[in-house]
Amino acid sequence: MKKHLLLLFIIGLAVTMQAETVVLSSGKTITGEILLQNDDVVLVRDKDGRRYQFMRSDVTEIKTEEVVVEEVEEQPTPSSHKISLRLDLAGGAAFIPSIHDGGFFGVDLQIGSRQIKGKKIFLGGSIGYTGVSAGSWYNMIPFMAVVSVPLMEGKHAPEVGVGLGYGVAVKKPVLGGICSRIDLSWRYQFSDKHALLLGVRANFQQAKVEDSELMPDGISYTKKNTHNIVTVGIRMAIAF
């Protein structure tokens, strides 16, 4: 406690300096520092650094007074770009048109700027894992560029987020493809750096799969088909 009081005292310390005022016979006054004075001349420098020389006979009085100069602590300028991390969890239903329906779960870590030009806009990238069960398992590692923009200012605010990138398949015979998503969330900002987001997520993922078909002649043919996986579910994210 004593250290804190001492620090506050040092920061708020005022410096007392002596200044001298030269009064001339014409009534004019010059305040500053006396550099030289003798029986012939008086040389004074004012606060702007300008020097004046007067004949001693023209000087009627030299006044000495104290001037209090307060030291002002320089405040750091807040950065317009601040790095933030987001841990994002999602889960819900998965649809592969004309094939199977199922479910999905996903997790990803996002890193980027949480503030741009004074507004809480998140802009960055993400890496994660998405598992889809729809007839068979589709395990993907999506890499995305993401942006989230609040629709209004305040501690509580709706937020829209979008992402675009590429999903890499964990193992064959599934191959990866383009992925994208959109988030609609409600953000609760409980500190300058920390926030909780709850909402819904829609995700699109392309996946190339080697499918085998048994023809009437008994011969099995293998070909690559592109499946468009659509997932819809809830999401929760923690920003810190």
Image (tube, grey):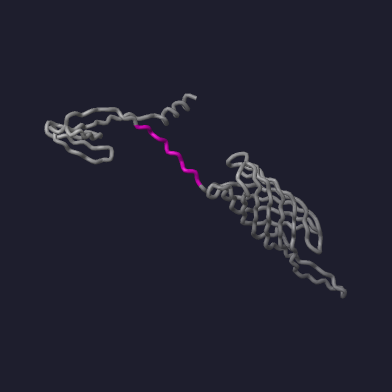
Q: Is residue 60 above or below residue 151?
A: above
* Number of marks in the rendered image: 0
Could you say which quadrant of the image residue 98 lies in?
bottom right
Residue 184 rendering spot, x and y as whole percentages: 69, 51
Q: Nearer the viewer, residue 143 or 119?
A: 119
Quarter of the rendering containing residue 164: bottom right
Image quadrant where one finds the C terminus: top right
Q: Nearer the viewer, residue 33 or 227?
A: 33
Note whether 23 is above or below 122 in the view shown.
Answer: above
Magenta highlight range: 69-79
Q: Is residue 109 left or right of residue 55?
A: right
Where is residue 120? Give x, y as percent: 58, 47
Quick check: 81 left or right of 66?
A: right
Name the residue at 14% across, 33% down.
58
Q: Point out residue 183 in the picture as x, y percentages from the top left corner.
A: 68, 52
User: Is residue 149 inside the magenta stretch?
Assistant: no
227 sits left or right of 144 in the view: right
Q: Residue at x 56, y 48 (%)?
A: 119
